Each structure stands twice: as structure tokens, then as C-alpha cells.
């Protein structure tokens, strides 16, 4: 089990990033540049850089934690994402929920205070999951958000983004 480096209140954020084939070329390049800019902005803020713990889940055919929870520091290397595969949003969001719940348990065991976790979804396309999976996921997100388990913030990028 990891040991806390300090007892500042934590701000857990998970970026859930679409790295499916439709993101290839300019979109994935822009996303990689945005991750570096995001890191630079966090580092500029002393309070934020000592509190924000960032995790990143990338999803295409399957979901993968490409950066586990940790503070964002100058030495932090952001992952370089590559686009391929389908848009399995169901697995991506479920993986984010899973690691958020695990992180909250860690905070409780180590007696650390934390702000309401945030899950940020960034995608350009329509999920390739079944309508039933998406409906179930929508209900899960709504229910857990209503119970203040996390705040969910979806962002569609590009003209063809399906905001439903």
C-alpha cells in the first residue's frame, strides 16, 4: 500500500480519453498536446499541484489505465496516446468508476480528506456498445452522480461528436 506524502485534501480526477481509430491524425495529436498543456497549467498552481491527483484511462477496443493516480509534478511524464480500434466507451467509463472507488477507499484507509472526485470524458464519436449497455451505463452514472460518488463531465470534440 502506498504511503501518503502529505495530508493535503486531494482532488481526484480521471480523464477518460477516446483513443479509437476515429481520433487518428489531428485529433490524437491535439489530445497529446492538450495533456502536456494541462500538466503545465497544473504545475503553475502550487496549491493545485499539491492536491490534484490525476489518473488517465484510455479506451478503444478495451479500457486501459495509462496513468494511475498521482500528483502532477514537473518530472511527470504524460502518456503519448495512439489511436486505433473501436469506441468502447462502456469499458472506459466503467474502468474510471472502478479506479475512483478504489482511490476513495485508499483515502479512507490512510485517513486523507478529499474533494468529490471528477470523471472527465473526452470523445469524438458514437460508442460502439449496445444500446442496452449505454442505457445501463447512463443509469449508473446518473445514480452515482446523484449520490455524490463523483461528478461526471462529458465533452464531445469535433463536428461529428454524438452528445447523446
Image (spheres, grey):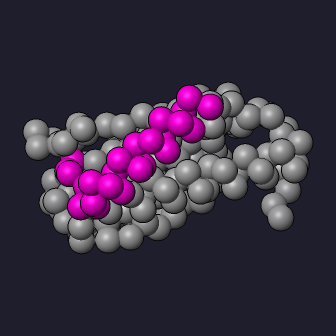
Q: Position of residue 154 (x, y in %)?
A: 36, 37
Give the extent of the magenta segment: 124-147
Residue drawn at x 16%, y 53% as measured from the top left: 26
Camera-side residue of 90 and 27? 90
Q: Position of residue 93 (x, y in %)?
A: 45, 53
Camera-side residue of 160 and 7? 160
User: Does residue 146 show up magenta in the picture?
Assistant: yes
From what the image shows, is residue 151 above or below residue 94?
A: above
Q: Position of residue 136 (x, y in %)?
A: 41, 50
Residue 163 lies left or right of residue 116; in this view the side is left
Q: Position of residue 101 (x, y in %)?
A: 66, 50
Q: Residue furthest left?
A: 159
User: Does residue 28 show up magenta in the picture?
Assistant: no
Q: Locate the N terminus and report the quarter of the image it occupies.
A: bottom right
Using the rendered view, name the quadrant where residue 11 is placed.
top right
From what the image shows, is residue 111 above or below residue 79?
A: above
Residue 16 lies left or right of residue 107; in this view the side is left
Residue 132 can be seen, yes or no: yes
Residue 84 lies left or right of residue 80; in this view the side is left
Residue drawn at x 10%, y 39% as measured from the top left: 159
Residue 119 lies left or right of residue 157; in this view the side is right
Magenta part mainly helix, strand or loop? helix
Q: Locate the C terminus and report the quarter of the image it occupies.
A: top left
Camera-side residue of 71 and 129? 129
Residue drawn at x 42%, y 62% as measured from the top left: 91
From what the image shows, is residue 16 above or below residue 63?
A: above
Camera-side residue of 157 and 47? 157
Amino acid at each position: 500500500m502506498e504511503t501518503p506524502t502529505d495530508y493535503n485534501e486531494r482532488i481526484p480526477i480521471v480523464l477518460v480519453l477516446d483513443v479509437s481509430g476515429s481520433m487518428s491524425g489531428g485529433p490524437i495529436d491535439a489530445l497529446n498536446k492538450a495533456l502536456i498543456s494541462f500538466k503545465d497549467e497544473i504545475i503553475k498552481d502550487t496549491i493545485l499541484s499539491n492536491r490534484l491527483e490525476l489518473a488517465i484511462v484510455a479506451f478503444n477496443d478495451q479500457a486501459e489505465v495509462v496513468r494511475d493516480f498521482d500528483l502532477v509534478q514537473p518530472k511527470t511524464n504524460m502518456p503519448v496516446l495512439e489511436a486505433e480500434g473501436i469506441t468502447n466507451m462502456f469499458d472506459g467509463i466503467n474502468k474510471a468508476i472502478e479506479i475512483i472507488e478504489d482511490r476513495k477507499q485508499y483515502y479512507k484507509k490512510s485517513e486523507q480528506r478529499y474533494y468529490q472526485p471528477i470523471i472527465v470524458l473526452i470523445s469524438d464519436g458514437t460508442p460502439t456498445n449496445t444500446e442496452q449497455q449505454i442505457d445501463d451505463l447512463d443509469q449508473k452514472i446518473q445514480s452515482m452522480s446523484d449520490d455524490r460518488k463523483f461528478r461526471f463531465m462529458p465533452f464531445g470534440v469535433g463536428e461529428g461528436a454524438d452528445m447523446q
